[in-house]
């Protein structure tokens, strides 16, 4: 199994508009791959403008926000490609699409790294941030999973939120709970509003 790095990927639309989305960047022995499922704006963007940036956000709210309709995060110009990257990141890498493996469901865009940079020191991991990340990913699969499985996983992830979250993580968790509650009902709100 390849290593998958959870990042914020930015691409440009055919009209030059920025598209910012959380994305698992697949790290294989010979490089990095984006493999979006159809339909996806990322596919159209990469076909029109074959370059992308992948950033590691310092604020977990960026990932939770992007999967809950909050995509207006500060960006900065890329260095080696036309486009923008997430501004507040530990680091980022810029890629040109070197090859496309077409597939009717999930094409693979193999990226060639043309630039990378570190922007802030990484001090350590936080369990609440990991829980928000897993909750965000879970919230993108509500149409594929049984409510009981989702609610069970949300309850387990909420333990880390309750024990280790700061204000940003609690806010991000609230956005995810709201999204899950909209799909499955108020019992998805494991933490009360006062606990956030």
Image (spheres, helix red, strand yellow):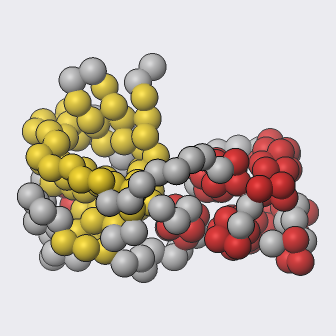
Residue 173, image x and y in percent? 71, 65
Is residue 49 in view? Answer: yes
Location of residue 172 with respect to 49 vertically, above or below: below
Quadrant occupied by the N terminus? top left
Q: Is residue 141 left or right of residue 180?
A: left
Which residue occupies 87% across, 65% down? Answer: 191
Looking at the picture, tell me which residue is in the foreground, 86 or 110.
Answer: 86
Residue 121, by quadrant, is bottom left
Q: Is residue 61 left or right of residue 76?
A: right
Looking at the picture, tell me which residue is in the foreground, 17 or 89.
Answer: 89
Quadrant occupied by the C terminus? bottom right
Residue 146, image x and y in percent? 77, 44
Location of residue 95 with respect to 162 vertically, above or below: above
Which residue occupies 53% across, 74% down? Answer: 69
Residue 78, image x and y in percent? 17, 65
Residue 52, image x and y in percent? 22, 55
Numbered label tally: 0
Looking at the picture, tell me which residue is in the foreground, 153 or 100.
Answer: 153
Is residue 135 in view? Answer: no
Q: Is residue 81 left or right of residue 17?
A: left
Residue 169, by quadrant, is bottom right
Which residue occupies 83% across, 55% down? Answer: 163
């Amino acid at each position: 199994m390849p290593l998958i790095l959870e990042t914020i990927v930015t691409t440009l639309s055919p009209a030059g508009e920025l598209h910012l989305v959380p994305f698992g960047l697949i790290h294989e022995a010979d490089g990095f791959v984006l493999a979006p499922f159809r339909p996806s704006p990322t596919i159209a963007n990469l076909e029109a403008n074959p370059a992308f940036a992948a950033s590691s956000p310092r604020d977990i709210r960026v990932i939770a926000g992007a999967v809950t309709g909050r995509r207006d995060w500060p960006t900065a110009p890329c260095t080696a490609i036309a486009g923008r990257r997430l501004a507040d990141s530990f680091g980022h890498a810029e890629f040109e699409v070197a090859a496309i493996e077409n597939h009717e469901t999930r094409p693979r865009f193999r990226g060639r790294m043309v630039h990378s940079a570190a922007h802030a020191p990484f001090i350590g991991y936080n369990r609440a941030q990991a829980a928000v990340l897993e909750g965000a990913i879970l919230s993108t699969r509500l149409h594929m999973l049984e409510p009981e499985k989702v609610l069970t996983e949300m309850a387990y992830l909420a333990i880390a939120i309750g024990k280790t979250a700061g204000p940003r993580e609690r806010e991000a968790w609230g956005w995810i709970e709201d999204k899950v509650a909209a799909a499955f009902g108020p019992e998805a709100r494991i933490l009360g509003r006062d606990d956030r």
